[in-house]
Image (cartoon, rainbow, N blue to C red):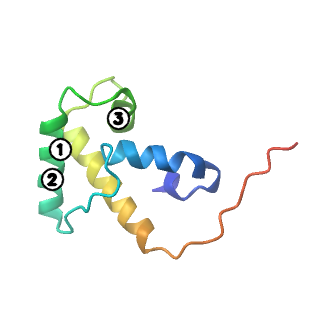
């Protein structure tokens, strides 16, 4: 969740949303935990072996270069929870980092 809220990473959010949503950030996700887990499991089954390099890097939490089913599902659920929390927050003014030292 922290990465989603850090202002200096604002330029990365669109790409991270694409990777986390498997290329479809506008897709409406199930609200119930069991239905969301089932959705994540089905998404993994559909994409198994076909994840892009960036998606592998996004979901490969243990850093072994591969994404297992439970690793994918757990990360997907955490990402969906973060996205849901961010959507509920009141938008604040985004600060632009000062890179002119």
Location of residue 58 (image quadrant): top left
* Contact (Cβ within 8 Å) of mark 1 with mark 2: yes
Q: Residue furthest right?
A: 101
The residue wearing badge 3 is: 55
Task: Bin the neighbour count of mark 1 within 10 Å (Cα to Cα): few under 14, some 14-19, many 20 and up.
Answer: some
Mark 2–mark 3 Cα distance, whole angstroms, equals 17 Å
User: What residue is rendered at 35% in x and 46% in y?
Assistant: 20
Mark 1–mark 3 Cα distance, whole angstroms, equals 12 Å
Question: Of label 2 and label 3, which has the lower sequence position?
Answer: 2
Q: Secondary structure at mark 2?
A: helix
Q: Secondary structure at mark 3?
A: helix
Measured from the top left, where is residue 27 in percent x and y? 27, 57
Quarter of the image for the N terminus: give it: bottom left
Q: Secondary structure at mark 1?
A: helix
User: What residue is rendered at 26% in x and 31% in y?
Assistant: 67
The residue wearing badge 2 is: 39
In the image, is 86 to the left or to the right of 40?
Answer: right
């Amino acid at each position: 969740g922290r990465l989603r809220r850090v202002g200096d990473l604002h330029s990365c959010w669109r790409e991270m949303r694409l990777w986390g949503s498997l290329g479809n950030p506008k897709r409406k996700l199930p609200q119930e935990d069991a239905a969301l887990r089932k959705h994540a499991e089905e998404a993994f089954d559909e994409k198994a072996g076909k994840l892009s390099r960036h998606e592998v890097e996004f979901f490969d939490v243990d850093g072994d270069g591969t994404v297992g089913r439970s690793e994918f599902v757990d990360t997907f659920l955490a990402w969906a929870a973060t996205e849901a929390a961010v959507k509920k927050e009141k938008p604040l003014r985004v600060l632009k980092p000062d890179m002119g030292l």
